[in-house]
Amino acid sequence: MSFVPPEITTVFATVLVITSFLTSALTAAMGLGGGVAMLAVLSLGLPVTSVLPVHGVVQMGSNSGRVIIQRRYLVAPLLLWFTLGSLAGITLGASVVVRIPDSLAKGALALFILWSVYRKKPSATAQRHGKAYFLLGGTISSFCTMLVGATGPLVAALLASTGLVKQPLVATHAACMVIQHGLKILVFGTLGFAYAEWGPLIAAMIASGVVGTWVGTRTLDNLPEAMFRLGFKIVMTVASLHMIWQAF
């Protein structure tokens, strides 16, 4: 089995491995942004039919590393309801993935993220969301991931509105993304995507992503909460503006 799939060059494969390290470090330090950046780079050199499946596997590997490294910060109770919602969202998304224009989906997602980041925040007591919130959030975000791939900013916006601080926010966000990407991988496999020929390259990208996660986690641990919040808002804004640019 060749390390480099026939659809891409050796140079681009090397770029992808390096990009996986950088984007994983960004996500571990800021909570998000790496998935959107990785999707953008993949789109430069991969066939359009390969972008979302490969992105899903790499991101699941990267986020799994984050969950393991930051496991003590996980807010586990909400994950059950998020998973149930994700099952519904993935099922719905798989049935309409070829019917909704990509530009419309990206534009709507970006506007929602910007609203979530810049809206007037509710009081601390109003930020305690129940089971229905995470059930609906899992459904909507998983539906969107089948259409645009990188919905990390959307999930981060849902979690940030609960008042989670930096480590619990980053760790729980990673677990949610593992759930979503895992389900998405199963769906694309069922639809016939040949993961085997991409196996060696994906393994190398996941390995470099784990190293990037370790580096980013060390940065997060030493980052003041106020600086994390500012960086989080900046990354969310840049990711949203990038989606809007792609939409138009």
Image (cartoon, rainbow, N blue to C red):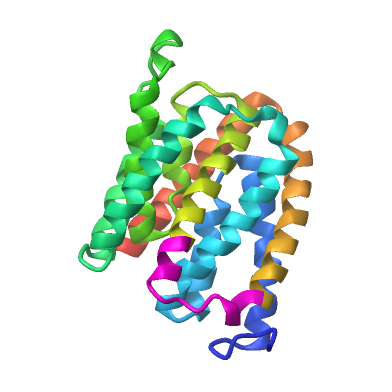
- Locate residue 83 relative to residue 202 in the image: left or right: left
Residue 230: image quadrant is: top right
- Locate residue 110 relative to residue 182 in the image: left or right: left
69 relative to 64, above or below: above
Let me know if residue 248 appears in the view: no
Q: Residue at x 64, y 71 (%)?
A: 202
Q: How many marks?
A: 0
Q: Residue at x 38, y 16 (%)?
A: 122
Instruction: State the image coordinates of residue 54 (x, y, percent, origin top left).
Output: 53, 69
User: On the rendered image, what quadrant is the C terminus found in?
Assistant: bottom left
Instruction: State the image coordinates of residue 145 (x, y, percent, origin top left).
Output: 39, 54
User: Was residue 193 drawn as part of the magenta stretch in this picture?
Assistant: yes
Q: Residue furthest front?
A: 190
Let me know if residue 41 appears in the view: yes
User: Was residue 39 drawn as part of the magenta stretch in this picture?
Assistant: no
User: On the rendered image, what quadrant is the N terminus found in?
Assistant: bottom right
- Locate residue 198 relative to residue 87 in the image: left or right: right
Q: What span is in magenta?
A: 186-199
**In front here: 109 or 65?**
65
Instruction: State the image coordinates of residue 13 (x, y, percent, origin top left).
Output: 65, 79
Q: Residue at x 36, y 39 (%)?
A: 85
Taken as a whole, is the magenta stretch helix, strand or loop? helix
Residue 133: image quadrant is: top left
Q: Residue furthest left?
A: 99
Instruction: State the image coordinates of residue 237 (x, y, percent, origin top left).
Output: 45, 44
Q: Residue at x 42, y 57 (%)?
A: 242
